[in-house]
């Protein structure tokens, strides 16, 4: 950040090391798209099929997490991992890899329960519709490229029962960070098998209605500190006054350069307020016609 007044400039930087925080989110919505009953909704079912069932009809899961309502708005996401529980597997089931793809359109979770759900009410999602009865998917089942991204956000091989964790990668982080910045574009993910042509790849995956086994999104993030900045720089004759805010418990340093392009910073002053935020004024005497380039930095915590 650079500010100028005549021949004066302020260079502001922060050198604080940042520690990461973590939060585990439960879905705010999830449901299944069930091809065998293409107009049914499964929004309140405790476990939904993902993959191809024995009749070789497909089933897919939709799930959405609220990033913007759960993280600070200026958070920088470092890692994202998705865990979920497989609660039922048919005898002789075929293994497959489950893929996660970012959804590009909105949908209605719905409130129908049961292993195959029930006819979707207006506004509920089904295999045929993202909002029954009138708003259809571009292709039944929510497919790429119009309903879901052609880019795979993550993938994990699935075999038997248990808890699975899809590890963090750049695409998952990008999805989550984008939803934090633009929550109106958060339509969640589509979870589907990469081997839907093979009967028996379906697995029952627990939903948010099963609180003990619900999917979880583990997000690691940092919150950048507020940048220290000069509120004003004024000059009266050969006196320059630098005004800025002191955060309680921080030690600040003010340095200056006489010319850009060099790294020979000269120390001017320290400032600190142990217990309360306060205003600070630092004065510097300079020769007529000379240049000064100032920087303000947080250099330490104080006890």
Image: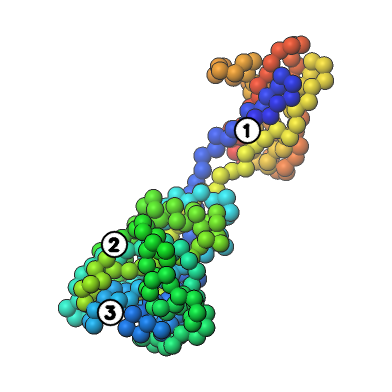
Q: Is residue 70 left or right of residue 57?
A: right
Q: Is residue 238 left or right of residue 110?
A: right
Q: Is residue 189 visible?
A: no
The CA span between labels 2 and 3 is 21 Å
Q: Secondary structure at mark 1?
A: loop
- Residue that mark 2 sits on: 156
- In the picture, the quarter occupied by the N terminus is top right
Check disc 1: other Cα within 10 Å, few if <14, some if 14-19, many if 20+: few
**Residue depicted at 55% across the width and 17% down the height:** 262
The CA span between labels 1 and 3 is 58 Å
- Residue that mark 3 sits on: 57
Q: Nearer the viewer, residue 301 or 252?
A: 252
Question: Whole-percent x and y of residue 214?
Answer: 41, 73
Q: Secondary structure at mark 2?
A: strand
Q: Secondary structure at mark 3?
A: loop
**Residue depicted at 36% across the width and 59% down the height:** 150
Q: Quadrant of residue 232?
A: top right
**Residue depicted at 65% across the width and 21% down the height:** 293
Could you tell which of marks 2 and 3 lies nearer the N-terminus?
A: 3
Check disc 3: other Cα within 10 Å, few if <14, some if 14-19, many if 20+: some
Question: Whole-percent x and y of residue 228?
Answer: 65, 36
């Amino acid at each position: 950040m650079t500010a100028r007044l005549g021949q004066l400039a302020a260079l502001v930087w922060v050198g604080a090391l940042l520690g990461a925080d973590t939060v585990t989110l439960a879905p705010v919505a999830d449901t299944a798209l069930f091809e065998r009953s293409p107009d049914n909704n499964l929004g309140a079912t405790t476990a939904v099929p993902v993959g191809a069932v024995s009749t070789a009809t497909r089933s897919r899961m939709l799930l959405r997490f609220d990033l913007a309502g759960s993280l600070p708005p200026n958070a920088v996401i470092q890692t994202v991992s998705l865990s979920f529980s497989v609660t039922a597997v048919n005898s002789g089931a075929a293994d497959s890899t489950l893929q996660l793809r970012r959804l590009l359109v909105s949908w209605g979770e719905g409130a129908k329960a049961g292993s195959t759900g029930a006819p979707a009410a207006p506004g509920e999602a089904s295999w045929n519709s993202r909002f029954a009865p009138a708003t259809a998917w571009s292709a039944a089942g929510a497919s790429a490229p119009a309903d879901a991204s052609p880019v795979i956000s993550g993938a994990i091989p699935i075999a038997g029962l248990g808890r699975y964790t899809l590890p963090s990668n750049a695409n998952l982080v990008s999805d989550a960070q984008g939803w934090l910045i633009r929550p109106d574009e958060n339509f969640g993910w589509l979870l589907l098998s990469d081997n839907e042509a093979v009967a028996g790849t379906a697995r029952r995956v627990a939903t948010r209605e099963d609180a003990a086994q619900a999917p979880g999104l583990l997000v690691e993030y940092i919150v950048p500190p507020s940048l220290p900045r000069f509120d004003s720089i004024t000059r009266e004759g050969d006196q320059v006054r630098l005004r800025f805010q002191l955060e309680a418990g921080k030690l600040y340093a003010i340095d200056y350069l006489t010319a850009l392009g060099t790294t020979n910073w000269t120390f001017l002053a320290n400032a600190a307020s142990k217990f309360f935020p306060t205003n600070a004024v630092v004065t510097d005497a300079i020769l007529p016609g000379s240049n000064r380039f100032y920087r303000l930095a947080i250099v330490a915590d104080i006890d």
